[in-house]
Image: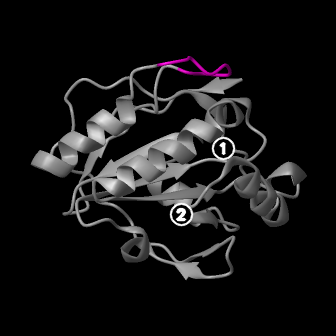
C-alpha cells in the first residue's frame, strides 16, 4: 500500500546521524552536506517506486552536487523481514543504478524515526542552516518512470541553493511505507 508523507514543515531542523555507507565509511550529516544545501532521501532497494526512478535519482543527485547540493540516501527498512533491502543488496543496487552518492544503512531505524520518514522515497531538502525547505517528490513518476517529467526536486533545491528557501507549493512524494521492525 502506498504511503504519502506530509508536506514540508518549513524550518524544521535536520537531525544528525552516524550511519555506515555501502563503501564501509561512517557518515554524519556534515559529511554529506553541500556548500549550498543538502538532500537526504529515505529509500530502499525493493520498493517499486524507488526502482522505477533509481536511474533518474542517480542523475539528479549528480546534477544537484554540481550546483552545490549534497545528497545521501538512507535505507531504514527491516532487512530481516525484507532481505532485498540488506546491506549486501544495497551495494549491488547502487552499482546497478550508478549511485555515486553515499547510500547509508539505518539498522536501528533511529534516524528514520527522528526524521519521521514515512515512505520510500521520502525526500528532505535542507538549506545551509539545516532548515527543511523541501519535502516533495522527485518528479511525477510513481511506479512507472514518466519521460521528460518536470524536475521538481532539482528545481526546488536550485531555489534553495540560490535563496535559502524552497517553493511554497510542493507535491508530496509517494511510495512504499517504511518497513518498521516489530516492537
Answer whether residue 93 is magenta in the image. Answer: no
Q: Is residue 146 left or right of residue 144?
A: left
Boundaries of the magenta span: 141-148
Residue 85 seen anywhere in this rendered image of the structure: yes
Tell me the SS state at disc 2: helix
Outermost residue, bottom side = 25
In this view, the residue in front, 132 or 23, is: 23
| Residue 111 image label | 2
The quarter of the picture where residue 115 lies is bottom left
Q: Is residue 142 magenta?
A: yes
- Magenta stretch secondary structure, dominant: loop
Residue at 76% over, 50% down: 96
Image height of 106 relative to 127, above or below: below
Report the side of 173 relative to 130 (left or right): right
**Residue 40: horizontal and vertical position, in percent?**
45, 54
Total marks drawn? 2
Amino acid at each position: 500500500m502506498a504511503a504519502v508523507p506530509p508536506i514540508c514543515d518549513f524550518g524544521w531542523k535536520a537531525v544528525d546521524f552516524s550511519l555506515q555507507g555501502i563503501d564501509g565509511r561512517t557518515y554524519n550529516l556534515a559529511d554529506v552536506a553541500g556548500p549550498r544545501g543538502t538532500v537526504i532521501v529515505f529509500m530502499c532497494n525493493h520498493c517499486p517506486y524507488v526502482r522505477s526512478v533509481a536511474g533518474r535519482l542517480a542523475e539528479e543527485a549528480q546534477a544537484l552536487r554540481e550546483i552545490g547540493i549534497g545528497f545521501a540516501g538512507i535505507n531504514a527498512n527491516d532487512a530481516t523481514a525484507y532481505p532485498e533491502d540488506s546491506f549486501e543488496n544495497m551495494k549491488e543496487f547502487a552499482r546497478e543504478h550508478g549511485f555515486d552518492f553515499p547510500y547509508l544503512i539505518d539498522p536501528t531505524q533511529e534516524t528514520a524515526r527522528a526524521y519521521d520518514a514515512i515512505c520510500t522515497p521520502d525526500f528532505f531538502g535542507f538549506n545551509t542552516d539545516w532548515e527543511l525547505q523541501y519535502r516533495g517528490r522527485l518528479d511525477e513518476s510513481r511506479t512507472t518512470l514518466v519521460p521528460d517529467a518536470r524536475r521538481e526536486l532539482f528545481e526546488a533545491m536550485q531555489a534553495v541553493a540560490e535563496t535559502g528557501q524552497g517553493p511554497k507549493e510542493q507535491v508530496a512524494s509517494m511510495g512504499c511505507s517504511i518497513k518498521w521492525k516489530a516492537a
